[in-house]
Amino acid sequence: MDVFGILNTMEQIGLYIHIPFCTSRCAYCDFNTYAGMTHYLDAYVNSVCKEIGSVSQSAPQNLYISTIYFGGGTPSLLSISHLKKILGMIHKNFVIVDHVEINLEANPGTVNLSYLKELRRLNINRISLGMQSAISEELMLLGRQHNTIDVIRAIKWARQAGFENLNLDLIFGLPGQAMQTWQASLEFALRMNPEHFSLYALSVEAGTPLQGWVNRGLIDGIDPDLVAEMYEWAGDRLEAAGYKQYEISNWAKQVNNEYLVCRHNMQYWRNQPYLGFGAGAHGYAGGLRIANVLSIPEYIDKCAKGETGEFPRSPATISEEFIDQKNEIAETMMMGLRLTSEGVSADRFHKRFGKALTDIYPDEINELIQWGLLEWDGNNLRITKNGRILGNQVFMRFV
């Protein structure tokens, strides 16, 4: 067991359920999400259940599930009966391990005490709230529909409902954002005392309203130097507050001798298998990376026809890519180096691939260590603090 006390997920699988419904689309969002389509919710949930059944029936053996993650979109738009139906189908078709992590993303303005109590009764034991900012003007710029009072209420209700594992998402590096307002948002969030933080630098994505505003000069562009300063300040502040950075964008608090990391995301960062269900969901299992159709109506239609392929394909699969060992090794390096404390273990690497880490990447490792971007303790290769700022350049060296 490593420093974070995380289960070995080598033979266990994570499940991701994509809920692409939103009341409105945020100005920065380029995810597969849709507003004004909640009339499809019942049919969509039925389709997700059909997809789960189809994939499980084609599996060559019993699949052991250690994490279940409802992401979006806005999963908290699902009713309790919707969630009960999906979770019931998962329990019917898979083997659920003890102490399974079940996470649900929620927008602060979409939950109440009664709903959160029902979530706990369904054994949903981790909730992730999209706070993003404590500054009203920044929330308006992002197109968020909640305010800070909604955040306070959602956290209070979550605690009353029995949630002891709560994450807050925040975004920094907004166009025109000052260091002072970023600091104010994080200080506000710290007063909420969550067990986990996810902090993301804003990326202006193609085709979003935010990109159009920047291109037309309606708002300022993003200052990369200031973004780096915001990131470094946040890391120091969270460390001082007792949070351990375990991944480039994620910090966890220690509770009962265990760091409450997001175990589902650890599945991705360790490049371990996971199955994705829903419109636009991705999966990686059996040496295949697969993706589902994006459109909600088309997803429903494909699941209704039920044309199941070989595992891990589903009726909704529209693309697949075989990942050979060379690419698997490269992706394991890229994802594993995001883990700032664990990094890439030479022992685990050799056990998985039958090759020594230093034999495959001797020049890359030596150069990055000399440049102060990686560090090596004889077994674990980790990214340094300086390397975190230049993460993409470090990761690309292993492609």
Image (cartoon, grey):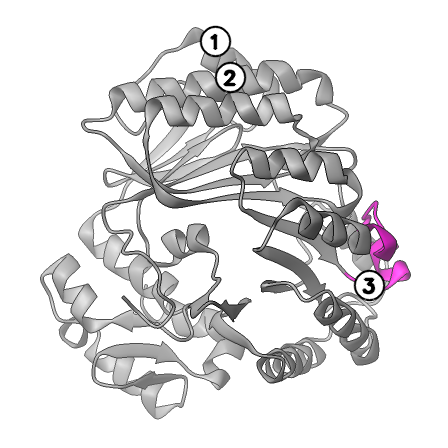
At a point 73% along the width and 56% down the height, the residue shown is 131
Screen quadrant of the N terminus: bottom left
Q: Which residues are magenta?
A: 133-150
Whether 219 is drawn above or below 46: the answer is below
Instruction: Check the image and name the residue furthest to the left.
Output: 354
Which label was assigned to residue 304?
A: 1
Q: Nearer the viewer, residue 215 or 233?
A: 233
Give yes or no for residue 14 being in the magenta stretch: no
Q: 364 and 166: which one is in front? A: 166
Q: Are marks 2 and 1 in contact (CB under 8 Å)?
A: yes
Q: Quadrant of residue 356?
A: bottom left
Q: Position of residue 294 (x, y in %)?
A: 55, 29
Nearest to N terminus: mark 3 or mark 2: 2
Which residue in the protein does label 3 denote?
A: 134
- Mark 2 — residue? 47
Q: Which of the pair 67/114 is nearer the observer?
A: 114
- Looking at the picture, how far across and down is residue 38, in whole percent? 72, 22
For mark 3, does the 10 Å Cα neighbourhood hold few (<14), some (14 to 19), or many (20 or more) residues?
A: many
Q: Are marks 3 and 2 in contact (CB under 8 Å)?
A: no
The residue under label 1 is which amino acid type?
Ala
Amino acid type of disc 3?
Ala
